[in-house]
Image (cartoon, helix red, strand yellow):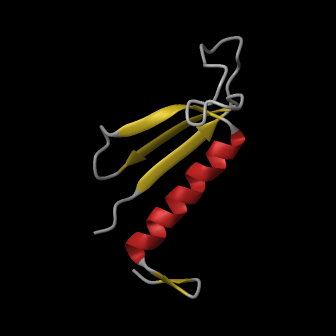
Amino acid sequence: MVSTDIMSFSTFDRETVNAPDLCSLCRAKAASLRYAVSSSDDASQKLNGYCCSDCASNLVTALEQRQRSQIGVVQGVFYA
């Protein structure tokens, strides 16, 4: 059975949210998005924080690669 990963991003208002100035992943760039990642296998295992746009893109790429490795992709066609 293939697990389902759930990832979400949202903007936030620095005036009302106590967010860090720097990305919690790379700690080099300004945090601009809030992220949350969880798996259908274990909803209690959740990763969340604030990240820059580059790290957000890296998270999406990592999710795509994880899903492709679980179900198999041959020449751009998905096989379950």
- Horizontal and vertical percent position of residue 30: 71, 28
Q: Where is residue 14 shown, x and y percent of the image?
A: 70, 16
Residue at the location (43% across, 79% down)?
72
Q: Is residue 15 left or right of residue 40?
A: right
Judging depth in this view, the residue of 73 and 28 nearest the camera is: 28
The answer to whether residue 67 is above or below residue 5 is below
Above or below for 8 versus 79: above
Taking the image as shown, residue 52 lies to the left or right of residue 41, namely right
Quadrant (top left, top right, bottom left, bottom right) of the C terminus: bottom left
User: In this view, which residue lies farthest toward the bottom?
Assistant: 75
Residue 1 % position (x, y): 28, 69
Number of numbered discs: 0
- Residue 16, image x and y in percent? 66, 12
Q: Residue at x 67, y 20 (%)?
A: 21
Question: Where 54 falls versus 60 (above or below)?
Answer: above
Q: Residue at x 51, y 65 (%)?
A: 65
